[in-house]
Amino acid sequence: MRSLIGGVGGAVLSGLAVILVGMQVQAEPTRATMPDIDKLIHYTTVTRGEVTEHIMTTREAIEAVKRGEPIPNGTHVALVDYRDGKVFRTFIMEKGENWGQDYPENRRTADWQFQWFKPDGTINEAENTARCQSCHMSRADRDFLYTFNEMRRFEFK
């Protein structure tokens, strides 16, 4: 009897662990939305092995960075991830007034929020945006962008 209870208890604990781990990798709701990619300016490309990332944003964001001003609220930064010549996913950073208050202070990336999208534009709930947020925290001196310097050097045509 004791082994039966122990076995059931172990199964319950194992099931609970799977659920909790699964919850950690699910996307959390954010305010970041999918912009009209065609209206953004492609300012750099990053290649990592077989992955090509086209990175784009608004003219207003690029101009603000060039002037040494904060990137304005309402800005989208899009990273379109291509694999085998096709869109695999799109990563969006969007900045909004007081959006940082949605998170505890130790998780804030100013007023930026993050979201992953599938090629069809729907939210990719399998991606964990908290992981993105934690990496981008190391770029506080560059408005939380890894491509801040590329944006500053970009020349409009």
Image (cartoon, rainbow, N blue to C red):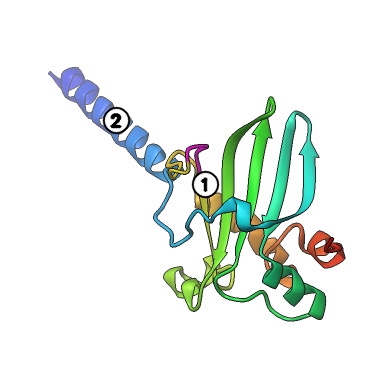
Q: Is residue 64 magenta?
A: no
Q: Pick the residue in front: 34 or 10.
A: 34
Q: Which residue lies furthest to the left in this view?
A: 1
Residue span colored magenta? 116-120
Quadrant for residue 26, please give it.
top left
Residue 91 picture location, percent across and down: 58, 48
Residue drawn at point x = 87 percent, y = 64 percent: 153
**Measured along the vertical axis of the image, is residue 71 above or below residue 29?**
below
Judged by its main secondary structure, the magenta piece is: loop
- For the C terminus, the image quarter is bottom right
What's the residue type where badge 1 is placed?
Answer: Trp
Q: Pick the residue in front: 120 or 149.
A: 120
Residue drawn at point x = 55 percent, y = 54 percent: 36
Q: Is mark 1 on a helix, strand or loop?
A: strand
C-alpha distance separating marks 2 and 1 = 27 Å
Q: How many marks?
A: 2
Say few, some or many: other residues with alpha carbon within 10 Å of mark 2 (under 14 / 14 to 19 / 20 or more).
few
Residue at mark 1: 116
Describe residue 22's horizontal placement relative to residue 59 as left or right: left
Say few, some or many: other residues with alpha carbon within 10 Å of mark 1 (under 14 / 14 to 19 / 20 or more).
many
Q: Is mark 2 on a helix, strand or loop?
A: helix
Sequence-wise, the earlier of marks 2 and 1 is 2
**Measured along the vertical axis of the image, is residue 33 above or below residue 98?**
above
Residue 34 picture location, percent across and down: 50, 53
Describe residue 25's horizontal placement relative to residue 68 as left or right: left
Q: Pick the residue in front: 28 or 11.
A: 28
Q: Are marks 2 and 1 in contact (CB under 8 Å)?
A: no
What's the residue type where badge 2 is placed?
Answer: Gly
Residue at mark 2: 15
Describe residue 45's horizontal placement relative to residue 27 as left or right: right
Residue drawn at point x = 41 percent, y = 52 percent: 28
Residue 59 picture location, percent across and down: 70, 67
